[in-house]
Image (cartoon, rainbow, N blue to C red):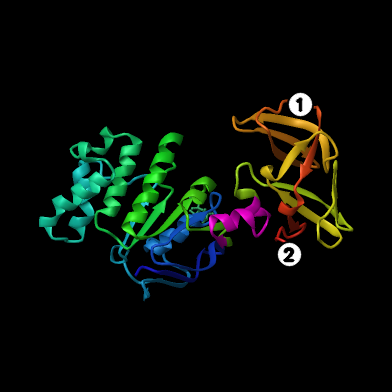
């Protein structure tokens, strides 16, 4: 069992708080993704779990055992970094073998285990090459093979795909998901890419400035974001967020009158996704000039401006109009989200 418990862990440097009171239990074999913008504390959280960084406060338990005072090498975890961290003077075989040597694993098993790991990530043809003779994708696979070779209970991956081009990122992402499923290890994966988070995670933790904003399955985070930060961070395009007021169940903002919203009178931020509205001939709740149009292939994205906000709506792929043309948008109120205008927290 490799359940990981983070009990109110914090990291401070002087008065600066890198991670604040992170409290979460990660189930055995779970794939947990830490997601957030640069500097939100994802890497620091990961480094505390790995033992590369002390915790200022709180306890970390792996498999029920407190590990705060254990050296990284004694925590039974394997890490994969964005930078790959391969040894340049060793060939692929020796790089993959390295963790077995360091831990004093029976040398008679090394060859079989290295070959197994190399086969798993399709590197058997490259065993004699040095890292400098490999592509970025191949280097990342060496790093993956090195992580899986000793069958750790816990995998920590810090932005492992961010140095790969878009196409390779998609195929390596699929490979990581498949590997982690096969190996049945508990995985914590750091990224600032919401698509990676949504596609890989059993649960996502969204962080901002060292503070956890929401923990949930990708569907929960997408369908019921806890606040405007999460709402605007998840989904492509980001959720439309419009500031306005509720008056007698009607949302009002520039160019917008949207009835049927159950909230007390007062200022509010209305959220809805591009797919939760459509272009109509006339009589929609939002009527405004088109700000821009983007052809996506399977749909046409139509954007208007309301107050300071850009509002994007998915129209039929054959929809055509000109910038500046007046457009009418029908908003599906049963898919609308309401957030407190001051705190940004979800209402109701
Ligand atoms: P990125 O995606 O850019 O890697 P991150 O979410 O992983 O960002 P962290 O590396 O965890 O962010 O950093 C969190 C905050 O802590 C940042 O503001 C960073 O500047 C700060 N920080 C990190 N290490 C130290 C340190 N040794 N001393 C002081 N501040 C630090």
Q: Which residues are magenta?
A: 215-231
Q: Where is residue 227 drawn, in percent x and y? A: 67, 58
Residue 43 is one of the magenta-drawn residues? no
Mark 1 or mark 2, earlier in chain: 1
Q: Where is residue 328 drawn, in percent x and y? A: 81, 36
Instruction: Tell me where residue 342 sits by quadrant.
Output: bottom right
Label for residue 348? 2
Q: Where is residue 17 drawn, in percent x and y? A: 55, 62
Question: Badge 2 local density, few (<14 within 10 Å), some, or many (20+)?
Answer: few
Q: Is residue 200 above or below residue 67?
A: above
Q: Does any portion of residue 334 appear in the rendered image?
A: yes
Question: Badge 1 local density, few (<14 within 10 Å), some, or many (20+)?
Answer: some
Figure quadrant of the N terminus? bottom left
Local SS, label 2: loop
Label for residue 323? 1
Instruction: Pick out the residue farthest to the left.
Output: 108
Between 346 and 213, which is closer to the camera in this rendering? 346
Q: Is residue 117 left or right of residue 193?
A: left
Residue 218 is one of the magenta-drawn residues? yes
Instruction: Tell me where residue 325 sits by quadrant.
Output: top right
Figure quadrant of the C terminus? bottom right
Q: Is residue 35 left or right of residue 306?
A: left
The residue located at (76%, 47%) in the rendering is: 242
């Amino acid at each position: 069992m490799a359940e990981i418990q983070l009990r109110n862990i914090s990291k401070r440097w002087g008065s600066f708080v890198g991670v604040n009171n992170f409290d979460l239990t990660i189930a055995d074999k779970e794939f947990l993704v830490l997601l957030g913008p640069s500097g939100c504390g994802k890497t620091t959280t990961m480094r505390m779990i790995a033992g590369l960084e002390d915790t200022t406060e709180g306890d970390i338990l792996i498999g029920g055992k407190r590990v705060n005072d254990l050296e990284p090498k004694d925590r039974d975890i394997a890490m994969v970094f964005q930078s790959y961290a391969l040894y340049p003077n060793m060939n692929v075989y020796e790089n993959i073998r390295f963790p077995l040597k360091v831990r004093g694993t029976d040398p008679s098993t090394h060859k079989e285990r290295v070959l197994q790991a190399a086969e798993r990530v399709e590197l058997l043809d490259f065993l004699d090459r040095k890292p400098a003779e490999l592509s970025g994708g191949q280097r990342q696979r060496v790093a993956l093979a090195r992580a899986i070779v000793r069958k750790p209970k816990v995998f920590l991956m810090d932005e492992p795909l961010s140095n790969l081009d878009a196409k390779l990122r998609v195929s390596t992402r699929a490979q990581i998901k498949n590997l982690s499923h096969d190996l049945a290890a508990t995985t914590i994966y750091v990224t600032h890419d919401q698509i990676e988070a949504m596609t890989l995670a059993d649960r996502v933790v969204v962080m901002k400035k060292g503070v956890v904003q929401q923990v949930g399955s990708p569907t929960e985070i997408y369908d019921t974001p806890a606040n405007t930060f999460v709402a605007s961070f998840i989904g492509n395009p980001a959720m439309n967020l419009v500031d306005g007021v509720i008056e007698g169940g009607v949302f009002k903002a520039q160019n917008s009158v949207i009835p049927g919203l159950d909230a007390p009178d007062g200022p509010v931020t209305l959220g809805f996704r591009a797919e939760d509205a459509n272009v109509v001939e006339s009589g929609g709740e939002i009527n405004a000039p088109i700000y821009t149009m983007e052809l996506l292939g399977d749909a046409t994205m139509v954007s208007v401006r309301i107050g300071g906000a850009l509002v994007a709506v998915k129209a039929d792929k054959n929809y055509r109009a000109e910038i500046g043309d007046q457009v009418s948008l029908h908003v599906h109120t049963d898919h609308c989200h309401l957030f407190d205008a001051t705190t940004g927290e979800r209402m109701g």
